[in-house]
Image: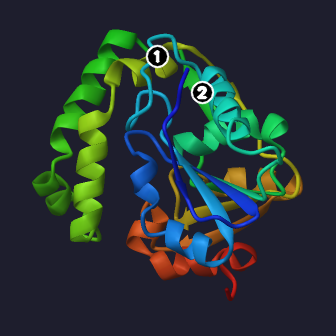
Amino acid sequence: MRLHVDERGSGPDTAVLLHGMMGSSESWWRVVPLLTDRGYRVLAIDLPGHGLSERDPHLTVERAAAAVVHAVRATSQRPPALAIGHSFGGLVLAAAAQELRPDRTVYVEAPFSSRGGWDRATVELEYERDRRERTVQGLRASRSYYGDEDCVVEARAAERFDPATAASVAAAAGGTLMPERGSIVVRAEPSDVVDDELVELLTASGVAVRGVPGAAHALWYSHFDGFVGALPEVFGPA
């Protein structure tokens, strides 16, 4: 499965960015310049069924992870210095981390468990309805914290999103993929995805958890400075 990779910067260290469900590589448009200014070569990847990447009617989290590993290895001989995954992209990153072997792994509002077994036709219809609502006007009305460019980027991502590919993931078997010891989880506070019970479990397993009070699910859209401040190891002085 061929994935579209938006490559920016030319530094010696590689940063891999994985967007969330119904997003795209463009979802990181605010974050990428910070990373390139700090010497990273950034690989922002369109996940299967998103952006300019191929569709996959049989997609699972594991197949998405394998495609990400292949895409990264096709552009770099060394493991990435940094990998960041948001939401669904975080779940894919958890599945890919053992093969990717990034020096630093960051999970942003990532669900580390999926129920699976959803009715595929029903989920596909729900995704299609959601996709149609994510116009520039719809996003401006529903997400007051989005700027004009945010609305344009996410509306374009919705236009390119394939509900059938996403529904395949929901219909597949579920499971749990916990982040590795030493990784970082950034969550909104409060969070419906990374709740307090999960925070305790993650902390006990050696994962650092940082919170951004009042943030939305896509933290860098609603609380950009808070998101950057939660990751001084990544976004410290250039």
What's under tag 2, amino acid-wise? Ala
Q: What's the mark number on residue 56?
A: 1
Foreground of the two, 124 or 32 = 32
Q: Are marks 1 and 2 in contact (CB under 8 Å)?
A: yes
What's under tag 1, amino acid-wise? Asp
Placement of 132 over or under 173, stated as above or below? below
Which residue is pictured at 23% across the width and 49% down the height?
155
Q: What's the mark number on residue 39?
A: none
Q: Earlier in the sequence, mark 1 or mark 2?
A: 1
Element under disc 2:
helix
Locate residue 37, reporting x and y percent: 60, 78
Foreground of the two, 146 or 234 = 234
Which residue is pictured at 14% across the width and 52% down the height?
138
Locate residue 38, reporting x and y percent: 66, 77
- Quadrant into which the C terminus falls: bottom right
Foreground of the two, 50 or 176 = 50
Q: Residues within 10 Å of mark 1 (few under 14, many from 20)?
A: some
| Residue closest to the far front | 10
Placement of 67 over or under 226, stated as above or below? above
Which residue is pictured at 39% across the width and 12% down the height?
120
Element under disc 1:
loop
Which residue is pictured at 87% across the width and 58% down the height?
182
Query: As drawn, is 178 to the left or to the right of 170?
Result: right
Q: Is residue 112 visible?
A: no
Q: What's the mark number on residue 64?
A: 2
| Residue closest to the far bottom | 237
| Residue closest to the far left | 137
